[in-house]
Amino acid sequence: MAIVNQVRKTVKMDLWSIVKFQLAVHSHLKTMNVSDLDLNCLTFLALSGETELTEFCENATKNKIFSSAQSVRNAVTKAEKKSLIIKNGKNRKTIVLNPELNIQIQGNILLDYKFVRVETKEVERAPERFQSEV
């Protein structure tokens, strides 16, 4: 019988934090580098819902997500390339968080993640970046 070191944590979070956490976990699991500012921008979009791009950039700037509308546009472009958001339309484009991410934003939210690492009988080598030099 294998022994498992189990860690159980229960944390109450506000809506902004729990949405941002879901986005951070998704990005981490997909090995995407997403900055904290970009996560804030994505969280703001998730909570705003489908929005016209120019309006979103202005609102994100007013809410101090980024200091300029151009910075918001740059973040949106990066997120679109990573399939985190979807742009629709030609002239007055709308943007929305990609529904395939399955980010919960309404009602009571309980995140039930289960992550596991199973050690094999053979001694596993640590990745090179964690090995100490001899």
Image: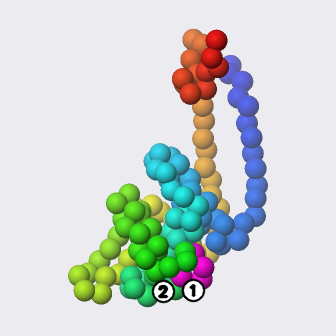
Q: Where is residue 108 in the image (x, y as percent from the top left)?
A: 65, 71
Could you tell me which secondary element the residue under label 1 belongs to?
helix
**Residue 55 relative to residue 115: left or right:** left
Q: In this view, does 121 lie above or below 71?
A: above
Which quarter of the rendered picture does the N terminus lie within?
top right
The amino acid at mark 2 is Glu
* Disc 2 element: helix
- In the rendered view, would you say 29 is above or below 38? above
Q: What segment carries the magenta color?
A: 60-65
User: Which mark is on residue 62?
Assistant: 1
- Name the mark on residue 33: none
In the image, taking residue 3 as reference, residue 109 lies left or right, namely left
Q: Which of 84 and 63 is in front in this view?
A: 63
Tag shown at residue 58? 2
Question: Which quadrant of the figure has residue 3?
Answer: top right
- Residue 104 location, x and y as percent? 55, 67
Q: Classify 123 as above or below 63.
A: above
Separation of marks 1 and 2 at Cα, in angstroms: 6 Å
**Can residue 47 be seen?**
no
Which image quadrant for residue 7? top right
What residue is rendered at 76% in x and 50% in y?
Answer: 9
Q: Is residue 134 shown to the viewer in this render?
A: yes
User: What type is the residue that disc 1 sits on?
Assistant: Lys
Q: Residue at x 57, y 86 (%)?
A: 62
